[in-house]
Amino acid sequence: MTAMKKWTVLLLVFSLVFLSLGQLTTWAEPQPDPTEEESQELDNELPFEVDAQSALLMEATTGKILYEKDIDTPFPPASITKNMTLLLAIEAIEEGKTDWDDIVVVSENAWRMKGSEMFLEIGQEVTVEDLLKGISVVSANDACVAIAEHLHGSEAVFVQKMNEKARELGMENTRFENSSGMPHENHYMSARDIATLAAHIVNNHPKILELESQMEFTFNDILQYNRNPLLRRYPGADGLKTGWTNEAGYCLVGTAKQNNFRLISVVLNAPSTQARLASSEALLNFGFANYTYTVIAQKGEVVGEAPVPDGKNTEVEVSAAELLGAVVQDGEGASLETVIEYEKVSAPIQKGDKVGQIIVMLEEEELNRVDVLANEAVERTNFAVIALRKVGGFFSNIGGGIMDLIRGIIE
């Protein structure tokens, strides 16, 4: 082999090695995460900046989330905790376990509570109603302990009930260690869980909204004002709860209703009261400006007829068990469609029995669904009638098939 040929072969080998290394380098280069890119693009398109560690915007009736930022990470919730304390107290009243005018004797444990308080005294007799007002309006830590002890004997047992309720509501990133939200390393809630609790409250226990929307509270001749800044300035705002500790930062779960459309905002660990308020207002403004709530069917409204093959009547009218609505961006309402999925219905049927579900769709996306109920009772018919119906249906199908065959030949 001549010197020229050797150099040619060496150049060819080096070229192949170089190309191979280039390919290896290309394959090893990390590819951008498309989900992360999409998320960044979404954030850039938002018309506001949420100056908080975690934030969420939810429509209250459907639970549809319209904006989210780190909503499943647990954070110290501070006094937002008190929404669960209020919920258990209101449920106890509704179940007859206590009453608004029941008297609670203040314990030393309640009196010793620091932070925000309604200035209870040891041995003082206070009504349940005043304690709940103190918790709602001035975020009274002493009132939380007093109501906990009144309902379950000790705050520790009451906290167990708080955690049980959280699990019942599907709050997966929540744990309570006290009734007030005082700092504890194992006391936390996520923004999603806070919104879930808030939605349950506004949809099922409006009395809590009535309490939390009061602007002031006087107890022991001491006048205090509601700490929720949304109440004094945002249209339709009627709750829910602020919070602050060094560990939690500035927090707020707010709610407002405009044109029969209720939103829930959550802001956690904001750097200041101004940032907490500005971010809450921006979230609510974004939701009300860009989304609408469309009612598809009222509770009790007739929405269709379910087949009852073995009933004396072969069909039964069905109605929506609950209000059915959908949250859509402006302009999408005309594209909504409804579908009813019937269960295999068999007589006898009682009035009010569940027979299926009505679903509202936007293109191929399911937005919401509720049960449909039978509007009247349907008795079972006899065996002979059922058999005749099946035979009739069989021949009807055959006849239809023959006609289709003849039509195909003629055409």
Image (tube, rainbow, N blue to C red):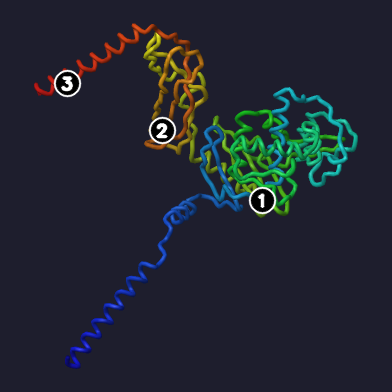
Q: Is residue 6 visible?
A: yes
Label 2 belongs to which residue?
361
Tell me residue 410's x, y (percent): 9, 21
Q: Relative to 376, does residue 47 appear above or below in the rendering?
A: below
Q: CA distance from mark 1 to mark 3?
A: 73 Å
- Observer-nearest residue: 388 or 284? 388
Residue 404 disc label: 3
Q: Is residue 235 visible?
A: no
Tell me residue 77's x, y (percent): 68, 46
Describe residue 86's horizontal placement relative to residue 4 as left or right.
right
Q: Residue at x 23, y 17 (%)?
A: 397
**Please, what is the three-letter code of the amino acid marked with disc 1?**
Gln
**Please, what is the three-letter code of the amino acid marked with disc 2?**
Met
Describe residue 218's horizontal placement relative to residue 23 as left or right.
right
Element under label 3?
A: helix
Tell me residue 169's x, y (percent): 60, 35
- Observer-nearest residue: 123 or 262? 123
Tell me residue 272's x, y (percent): 68, 53
Residue placed furthest toward the right: 123
Q: CA distance from mark 2 to mark 1?
A: 39 Å
Element under label 2?
A: strand
Label 1 belongs to which residue?
274
Residue placed furthest toward the bottom: 3
Q: Relative to 377, does residue 409 appear above or below in the rendering?
A: below
Element under label 1?
A: helix
Q: CA distance from mark 2 to mark 3?
A: 33 Å
**Please, what is the three-letter code of the amino acid marked with disc 3?**
Asp
Name the front one of labels 2 and 3. Answer: 3
Q: Relative to 37, does residue 177 appear above or below in the rendering?
A: above
Describe residue 342's horizontal placement relative to residue 281 as left or right.
left
